Image (cartoon, rainbow, N blue to C red):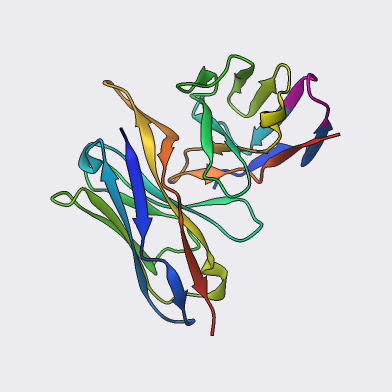
Amino acid sequence: EIVLTQSPATLSLSPGESATLSCRASQGVSSDLAWYQQKPGQAPRLLIYDASNRATGIPARFSGSGSGTDFTLTISSLEPEDFAVYYCQQRSNGRTFGPGTAVDIK
Amino acid sequence: EVQLVESGGGLVQPGGSLRLSCAASGFTVSSNYMSWVRQAPGKGLEWVSVIYRGGSTYYADSVKGRFTISRDNSKNTVYLQMNSLRAEDTAVYYCARDLCSSTRCYPAFDHWGQGTLVTVSS
């Protein structure tokens, strides 16, 4: 079973700063990795699929990179609405999610 | 417009059963990959089950043998039959659709329902 690890668990930043979130897979997953944003009381929203493709309607400040076992989600300049929890997800024996990274206001 | 609407959640005793429904509109469930994802209170996301276009199904180890995913093409609806429920199954259950282009489907959920709460407690 492939396990996803996300770091850091919490990222405290100010609006306008850049955020770098990491997701590591215990085995290679090629580029089959997605990123989601979730705010309290809401369903998750797809940000990135296939490791680096932005989903429809996602602002350009969100970018994804990586392949194999190491992946990164970068938010180039945090807007107030970007403070949320971010999950990575891959396909292996179905689908699995990472534990999440909370981006909160410093 | 793509829409997913879950229903069927509620309070159930340990050992009991519940069937969740996910009514889809704006697309055909039989042409897509459909999953159930759950989120326990204050916790992260946990994938539960998927049904592929051809009808193949897969389950998380935590629910294998107790949950069954199915679909009714005539109703354009996906179901999750949950048996032998445990306290740890308490969660909001979301229905979600894989992102599909004209040539392939990606293991990424581009549409989600609003979720339905399942509480397992005596």
Q: Nearer the viewer, residue B60 or B38?
A: B38
Please report the residue visible at 48 percent of the width from the left and 21 percent of the height from the top: A57
Which is more toward the observer, A91 or B42? Answer: B42
Does the magenta portion include B55?
no
**What are the residue bounds of the magenta stretch?**
A13-20
For residue A39, what is the image quadrant? top right
Q: Residue at x 56, y 74 (%)?
A: B87
Q: Is residue A102 left or right of residue B102?
A: right
Q: Which secondary structure class fits the magenta region best?
A: loop
Where B37 sits versus A13, above or below?
below
Q: Is any part of residue A29 visible from this angle? A: no
Coordinates of residue B23 in the picture (x, y in percent): 28, 51
Q: Quadrant of the C terminus of chain A?
A: top right
Q: Image quarter for residue B107?
A: top left
Q: Looking at the picture, does residue B119 appear above or below residue B6?
A: below
* Residue A17 shown in magenta: yes
Toward the bottom, the furthest residue is B122
Residue B105: % across, % down: 34, 29
Residue at 47% over, 75% down: B11
x, y percent for residue A104: 78, 37
In the current view of this chain or complex, which residue is farthest to the front?
A80
A19 relative to B66 in the view: left or right: right
Residue located farthest toward the right when viewing the structure as drawn:
A106
In the displayed structure, B97 sits above or below A15; it is: below
Q: Residue B92 location, x and y as percent?
A: 51, 59
Q: Is residue A16 left or right of residue A87?
A: right
B116 vs B87: above or below = above
A81 on left or right of B101: right
